[in-house]
Amino acid sequence: MNIDFTNVPKHYAARTQEKMREVLMNPAGEGPAVHYYMLRGGVDQKNTTVWEPGTISGEYIKTYGHYHVGDLSENYFVAFGQGVALLQKLAEDESGQLIADQVEQFRAIVVKTGDSVFMPLKFGHLVANTGQTYLVTIDDSPVDFDDRDPSSFPGHADYELVKQMRGFAYYVVEGENGQPALKRNSLYKSIVEEDLGGLSVIE
Ligand SMILES: [Fe+2]
């Protein structure tokens, strides 16, 4: 075994309620002190993410969500639990700049233990835990341990557009029947194409 221990102290990171308020459907909602935990091993050891179960003002606990900078896609494997993955691709202006409030393609994918999800190039992504237990995923995203803020995971990701729009084009919420549903984020002006994975939309 040839395992390098150098970056071990940087492997663990967590997303707190305070940080997540930036992207919650209801930023003032009551939630757990920590929403999710990350063990960052990068391409070689893989990254493990563990979500707390539960809702904040009806919205399921989720990852912050980010876009990739550069030529990068990634694979998520669901090791345990159930969730909904959201993927969205923003429109671009003539100079290739992303337009924060215009979505070209949106997808919601219902996932459970044993499923894999591919996050293609240019698709921002997040995953919400819609089950009663922890949700656990393993992904193969590279990690930059030289990043000055170790809580930004991974270093190649852009969170600003998500922050600016206070989340993705839909929030994953608990429907009347206790099943996951979607609720539109009204800050987004348009969605050209969408595949909601069979989930209903709550007005
Ligand atoms: Fe990513």
Image: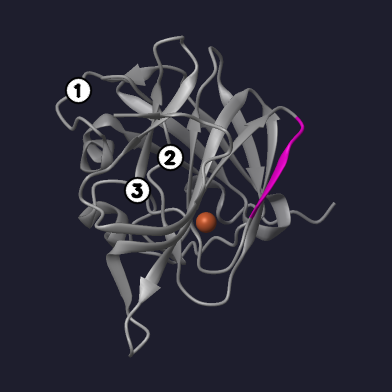
Instruction: Tell me the distance, in whole angstroms, between the alpha carbons under discs 2 and 1.
Output: 16 Å
Q: Which residues are magenta?
A: 114-118
Disc 1 target residue: 29
Instruction: Answer yes or no: is residue 3 visible.
Output: yes
Query: Disc 2 vs disc 1: Cβ atoms closer than 8 Å?
Result: no
Task: Establish if 199 lies above or below 116.
Answer: above
| Residue 138 forms part of the magenta stretch | no
Q: Main secondary structure of the magenta part?
A: strand
Q: Quadrant of the C terminus?
A: top left
Residue for point 32% across, 82% down: 93
Residue under pointer 3: 169
Element at badge 3?
loop
Residue placed most toward the observer, 1 or 133: 133
Q: Residue at x 39, y 53 (%)?
A: 150
x then y, percent, for residue 156: 47, 67
The spot of residue 39 in percent (x, y) is: 56, 41
Residue visible at 26% across and 54% down in the picture:
188
Q: How much space separates mark 3 and mark 2, taking CA atoms? A: 14 Å
Mark 3 closeness class: few <14, some 14–19, many ≥20 residues within 10 Å: many
